[in-house]
Image (spheres, rainbow, N blue to C red):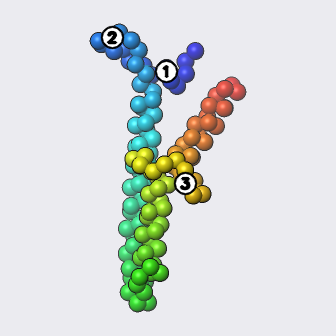
Amino acid sequence: MITPDNYFSARSETRGTAMPVWPQLRRLLIFQFKLYIDALRDFLLSLLSIGAFILDAITNSHGPDSHFESVLKLGRRSERMINLFDQYPNEQDGGSRVDDIIEDVEARFRHKRDRS
């Protein structure tokens, strides 16, 4: 039976044994997906930070309650949600993480495939 774990395999030249390619391909695809999300986040944060700076300049706001600081907090939170380089532990204070969403989609796909 073909499974995602053995679907893509390559022969090792030195050992003649099958090396599963799927786990590494999966990691690559997830990393690429996270890179796109991170790039979009950076673009949006850039626009938000400029807008926040302008608002702060107009209203003479500065310090921890400024709009700019709120954008920085949003950036930190979104960085943990994306977890591009897996530097943050899986436990997170509420909210969805990209890894959780990917796992949910994979589980739904597997469930649907198993029912077929």
Q: In which quarter of the image is residue 25?
A: top left
Give the alpha-carbon distance from disc 3 to disc 1, as whole Å.
33 Å
Looking at the image, which residue is at 29% across and 12% down?
14
**Residue 58 seen anywhere in this rendered image of the structure:** no
Instruction: Give the residue type at disc 3.
Output: Gln
**Nearer the observer, disc 3 or disc 1?**
3
Q: Quick one: 55 or 76, which is closer to the camera?
A: 76
Residue, disc 1: 7
Q: Pinpoint residue 40: horizontal percent, then vertical percent.
A: 42, 57
Q: Mark 3 or mark 2, which has the lower sequence index?
A: 2
In the image, which is nearer the foreground, mark 1 or mark 2? Answer: 2
Q: Which of 74 and 4 is in front in this view?
A: 74
Number of residues whose C-alpha sits closer than 10 Å to that of mark 3, classed few (under 14), some (14–19) or many (20 or more): few
Circles 1 and 2: CB distance less than 8 Å? no
* Label 3 vs label 2, nearer the camera: 3
Which quadrant of the rendered structure holds the C terminus?
top right
The answer for how far apart the CA atoms under marks 3 and 2 are is 42 Å
Q: How crowded is mark 1: few (under 14 residues within 10 Å), some or many (20 or more)?
A: few
Residue that label 2 marks: 15
Q: Position of residue 12 (x, y in %)?
A: 33, 15
The earlier-in-sequence mark between 1 and 2 is 1
Nearer the N terminus, badge 3 or badge 1?
1
Q: Which amino acid does label 2 sit on?
A: Arg
Residue holding disc 3: 92
The amino acid beneath tag 1 is: Tyr
Disc 3 on helix, strand or loop? Answer: loop
Q: Quadrant of residue 16?
A: top left
Residue with the most extreme right position: 115
Query: Could you tell me which secondary element the residue under label 2 belongs to?
Result: loop
Establish if 59 lies above or below 111: below
